[in-house]
Structure formats: structure tokens, C-alpha cells
Image (cartoon, rainbow, N blue to C red):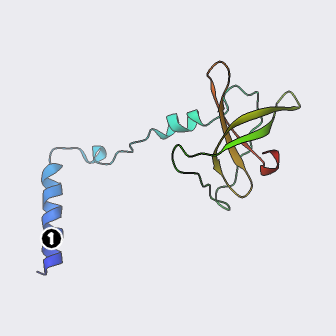
Amino acid sequence: MTGQAAQAAGAKARNENCLSGVPESATMMNKVDTASAAWHFDNHDGAYISLTPDFGSSPATHAPYRREPYISADIPLTAGGTEHITGKAGGWTASAVLVQWSDTEGARHNVWVEPAQV
């Protein structure tokens, strides 16, 4: 057995020993509750119109944590018109920008808009 093969066999044996008695369904766990995370990024009050970017053709990017750029944007309202918002660019694609802000009551908002609105 080569050195690499022996190391791999040893690592596999250690993993099996650590997981003995643990059901296989419990060995893989997502550390992020994706349903909860998605809920936080949705527009819940329905007051704003949010785009749905096509991430397949234009993947999203973002700034490093706590270095998001401040922006101003005209957010379209479902009742018509727009509201001028100052917030942060939480992410962006070639066709959309995620505007994130807190209102005066402390509620968080996340709305995707066209770049021309920023």
C-alpha cells in the first residue's frame, strides 16, 4: 500500500469510528436553515415590487462582509410610484441589484431592482 493510500485508509477508519452508532441520515447536515434564510430575503409586506433575477445566466456577487457599498435607489411600490431609499447593495448581477435597508420601525427590507434605479 502506498503512503497516500495508507493515509486515506486511516482517515476513513477514523471517520467510521467517529460516526459509529450515528444514523446515516444524521451524518449530513446543512448548517444553514435554507427556508429561514430565504424568508429573511423575501419581500414580506408586499409594499415593494422586487425583481426575480436569473441567477443561471448572471450569477450574483457581493462585497466582503460588512463592506457592502451604500446606495440610493428608487424602489417601485405596488400601489404605484416609487420610494427613494438609502441602503446597502447586498448583492448584484448584470441585470439586478439587491437593495437592503431598515425602515424607521426597524423592519428589514430586501428588494431586487434594475441597475438603472440605483
Q: Residue furthest top?
A: 105
Which residue: 38% across, 42% down?
31
The quarter of the displayed image where residue 89 is located: top right
Q: Position of residue 18 (x, y in %)?
A: 15, 50
Task: Please say if 87 is above or below 107.
Answer: below
Q: Residue furthest bottom?
A: 2
Task: Please say if 93 is above or below 23.
Answer: below
Which residue: 16% across, 63% down?
11
In depth, the one of 18 and 117 nearer the eye is: 117
The answer to whether residue 48 is left or right of residue 40 is right
Q: Position of residue 75 (x, y in %)?
A: 79, 36
Q: Position of residue 15 (x, y in %)?
A: 18, 56
Q: Secondary structure at mark 1?
A: helix
Q: Position of residue 2 (x, y in %)?
A: 13, 81
Residue that numbered label 1 is attached to = 7
Q: Residue furthest right?
A: 81
The answer to whether residue 78 is left or right of residue 107 is right
Which residue: 59% across, 52% down?
62
Task: Please say if 46 is above or below 4.
Answer: above
In which quadrant is the C terminus drawn? top right
Which three-letter amino acid code belongs to the residue tagged 1? Gln
